[in-house]
Image (cartoon, rainbow, N blue to C red):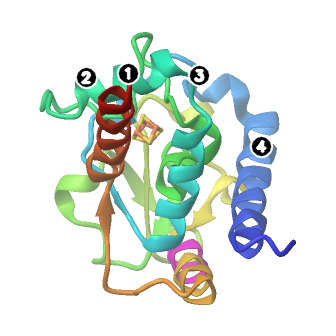
Amino acid sequence: MNDPLAAHRALVAKVDAFEGAVRARRDASMACRAGCSACCHAELSVCDVEAALVREGLAVLDDAARAHIAERVDVHDGRCVMLDHEGRCAIYDARPLVCRTQGLPLRYPDGVIPEAAIMARGKGANGGALTWCPLNFQGDDHAPRAEDVLDAERVDAMLALSNREHGGDPSRRTSLRALAREITAELNEGNALC
Ligand code: SF4
């Protein structure tokens, strides 16, 4: 059977491989660890192909995890609705690309990153602006190296292509909160049938 998310999974695997290679070289310079949710204080939205992957991730959660997300659906405390009790991502394997890349040094064209979004920053060796989590790559000894830098503009372009191949509407974004709300509706429906 054809996997409608095959092309997107390939992109995710590529990005994960890049992150894994940076991690292997620079682990001592990175604070990204299970339980660190510093970059999860956000209200994210995703395109259609990523929403499909997130729905998959939600579908395989156990009842306790689904109930926890359902409880948080109307809690607006600045934390992502997908965070569990321990500050871990409940949909880790299905999380969006932006979450998979946040700790890395990301290169954008000059002027593209909103000033408010820049946490730590520098200049790319090949032009552009770099931004990265300030908990990572601290101090001169641990500064990002050219081989650690992910071309965020290219990843965005590949995601747009993946979304198009999936048949996604390029103008549609769905919030993670709205996706979480879908399981609330399913849980309510299940309870009504009991
Ligand atoms: S989806 Fe997961 S990794 Fe992304 S912001 Fe939410 S909790 Fe964090």
Q: CA distance from mark 1 to mark 4?
A: 32 Å
- The crowd level at tag 4 (other Cα within 10 Å; few <14, some 14-19, many 20+) is few
What is the three-letter code of the residue carrying label 4?
Answer: Gly
Kindly identify which residue carries mark 4.
20
Question: In terms of secondary structure, where does tag 1 sit?
Answer: helix
User: Label 2 to label 1, Cα distance in Å?
Assistant: 6 Å
Mark sitting on residue 38: none
Mark 2 or mark 3, which is nearer to you? 2
Q: Which is closer to the viewer, label 1 or label 4?
A: 1
Left or right: residue 88 versus residue 112 is: right
Please tell me whether residue 126 belongs to the stretch shown in magenta. Answer: no
User: Nearest the camera: 8 or 39?
Assistant: 8
Residue 88 picture location, percent across and down: 49, 22
Tell me how far mark 2 sits from mark 4, CA to CA.
Answer: 33 Å
| Label 3 lies in ligand 1 vicinity (Cβ under 8 Å) | no
In space, the residues marked 3 and 4 are separated at their CA atoms by 13 Å
N-term-proximal mark, 2 vs 4: 4
Examine the image and state in which quarter residue 82 appears: top left
Q: Mark 2 vs mark 3: which is more N-terminal?
A: 3
